[in-house]
Image (cartoon, rainbow, N blue to C red):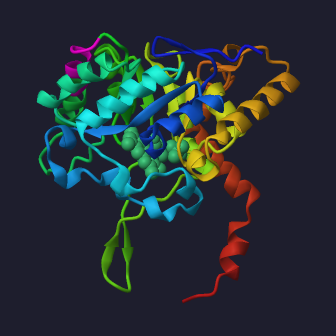
Amino acid sequence: MDMTTRYMGLTLKNPLVASAGPLSEHLDNIRRLEDNGAAAVVMFSLFEEQIRHDTAALDFFFNLGRDRFAEAASYLPEIQDYDVGPGQYLDLLRKASEAVDIPIIASLNGISEHGWVTFAKEMQDAGASGIELNVYYIPTEPFRSGSEVEQQYVNVLSAVKARVTVPVAIKLGPYFSSFADMASQLDEAGADAFVLFNRFYQPDFDIETGTVMRSLTLSRPDEIRLPLLWIALLYGRVSASLAATTGVHGPIEVIKYLMAGANVVMSTSAVLQEGPSFFARVLAEMTDWMEKKGYTSVDQMRGSMSQASVIDPTAFVRGNYIKTLENYTKTTDITARLARLKPY
Ligand SMILES: Cc1cc2nc3c(=O)[nH]c(=O)nc-3n(C[C@H](O)[C@H](O)[C@H](O)COP(=O)(O)O)c2cc1C
């Protein structure tokens, strides 16, 4: 079985990649990810605020929920062990790149195109095979237009691209009024890959204490649908590679994402729950499935369910929504259901 795949100009031994997350904070864990078959590791993010010494935002991903995942306790470092300084990040990146044979992709997380982007070059010099730029941005300013926000994404990508020769991926959220256009603009600006999608932190309320709860929930497999849709829609339409992130908990999600057109499929939540051996299990199970179905390579499977390949491309868009609703009303006796409902 030929499991190799091309991703942002790199040749990977298989399409399974460890996405940015706390596991990469320790060299031992990066080794364990490689030993279990991960084809590349995206390191946790270094935030613009860290580089600019704006300590207010430092603990964003790292403190959130760290003590909530009992399963992860054995391989997650204590927060006090975690030194978030840029110097330490580069040091770990350098050690990781030397310690393993798989590519290490460094992650920069920010929104402005100013001074901090020069750090991308330092990441490259420290051995990063690529940079993943996470534009984690929730535009809350009134009177800031959608096109201004989009231009900011293009600017920050261009600023990073101008400083490095290694490939640059951009990790995005789905909330644009025209995602396909945004992707095209970033494609033109030279994005080497799209990582779809950022899973935005959504606070919850504790109604007893009247407080905003800062808890991070791990993903579930049914969350793959939005990235799956957009990967299927973008496949063959952009030059950039496509990485799927969100909801990958087993071989089924990996296979679906590959069929939609992903070059690689990433995972964090499942690895936090199961440990690095998640990769070995999924690799074995998906290879087994592919053999049974007569596939000889990952390339053969890629994009087979994308909009470019399916017989009815309307299955991805509005036409299918209308058909689905029609079908629901035909097959569901709504009047009878409503009659059974008790009035308030
Ligand atoms: C505890 C935790 C820490 C994370 N840290 C980062 C990070 O530093 N940078 C980043 O781009 N994404 C980060 N993520 C997001 C993951 O890389 C991934 O995109 C997201 O969790 C969806 O994938 P999953 O369903 O496999 O978890 C983090 C996720 C979790 C759960």
Q: Identify the residue at image location x=30%, y=23%.
A: 123
Q: Identify the residue at image location x=14%, y=51%.
A: 142
Residue 271: image location, x then y, percent: 59, 45
Residue 158 located within the stretch drawn in magenta: yes
Q: Quadrant of ligand 1?
A: top left
Residue 265: image location, x then y, percent: 57, 31
| Foreground of the two, 278 or 302 | 278
Total count of labels: 0
Task: Give the side of residue 132 with respect to residue 244, left or right.
Answer: left
**The C terminus: image quadrant:** bottom right
Residue 205: image location, x then y, percent: 37, 73
Residue 147: quadrant of the picture? top left
Give the vertical position of 35 relative to 125 (above or below). Answer: below
Q: Is residue 232 visible?
A: no
Residue 230: image location, x then y, percent: 50, 32
Task: Give the side of residue 105 with respect to residue 256, left or right.
Answer: left
Q: Is residue 192 visible?
A: yes
| Foreground of the two, 17 or 325 | 17
The dominant secondary structure in magenta is helix
Task: Give the side of residue 106 with respect to residue 307, left or right.
Answer: left
**The N terminus: image quadrant:** top right
Span shown in magenta: 156-164
Q: Identify the residue at image location x=22%, y=47%.
A: 139
Residue that extends furthest to the right in the rendered view of this protein: 292
| Foreground of the two, 279 or 215 | 279
